[in-house]
Image (cartoon, grey):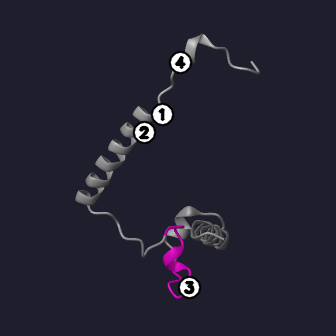
Amino acid sequence: MTKTQILKLIRAHCLDCCCNSIKEVQECPIVSCALHDLRFGKDPSRKKMNPEDAKTLGERLHKARTENKRTHTRTKNPAGSKLKGG
């Protein structure tokens, strides 16, 4: 089971505990519950990316995608040959 699947199950459990009310899950007063920090279905220990790193990563992703488009462009069939099976 993946971490994402586990977090989704925890979220579903919290919704069930609070009669499927999102607002009740948000305002859950049971801080002694072991799942309290995970009730939103997200990992609270996951660090957020700072804006500089996000910009650098975005630029790298953009460059990789443009390079990928250049190398995977469609080419015409040589000498106008027809594809089999069509």
CA neighbours of label 3 inside 10 A, class few (<14), some (14 to 19), many (20+): few
* Crowding near the residue tagged with mark 4, few <14, some 14–19, many ≥20 C-alpha atoms within 10 Å: few
In front of the other: label 4 or label 2? Answer: 4
Dividing the picture into quarters, in which one does residue 54 lie? bottom left
Mark toward the viewer: 1 or 4:
4
Residue at disc 3, secondary structure: loop
Helix, strand or loop for the magenta stretch, by majority: loop
The reply to whether dot 2 and dot 3 touch (C-beta < 8 Å) is no
Crowdedness near tag 1: few (<14), some (14–19) or many (≥20) residues, C-alpha within 10 Å: few
Q: Position of residue 30 (x, y in %)?
A: 53, 83
Q: CA distance from mark 3 to mark 1?
A: 52 Å
- Assess whether mark 4 and mark 1 are in contact (beta carbons under 8 angstroms): no
Labelled pair 3, 4 in contact (Cβ < 8 Å): no
**Bounds of the magenta segment:** 29-42
User: Mark 1 or mark 3, which is nearer the start of the sequence?
Assistant: 3
- Which of the labelled discs sits on residue 33, or is there none? 3
As drawn, the label of residue 57 is: none
Q: Secondary structure at mark 4?
A: loop
Observer-nearest residue: 12 or 5? 5
Q: Amino acid at mark 2?
A: Asn
Between residue 24 and residue 76, name the one nearer to us. Answer: 76
Above or below, 2 relative to 71: below
Q: Where residue 76 is drawn, which disc sits there?
A: 4
| Element class at badge 1 | loop
Q: Is residue 34 left or right of residue 84?
A: left
Residue 46 to residue 53: above or below: below
Please state which of residues 8 and 19 is positioned toward the viewer in this rendering: 8
Task: Give the quadrant of the N terminus.
Answer: bottom right
Q: Which residue is mark 1?
A: 72
Label 3 or label 1, whichever lies nearer to me, is 1
The label on residue 68 is 2
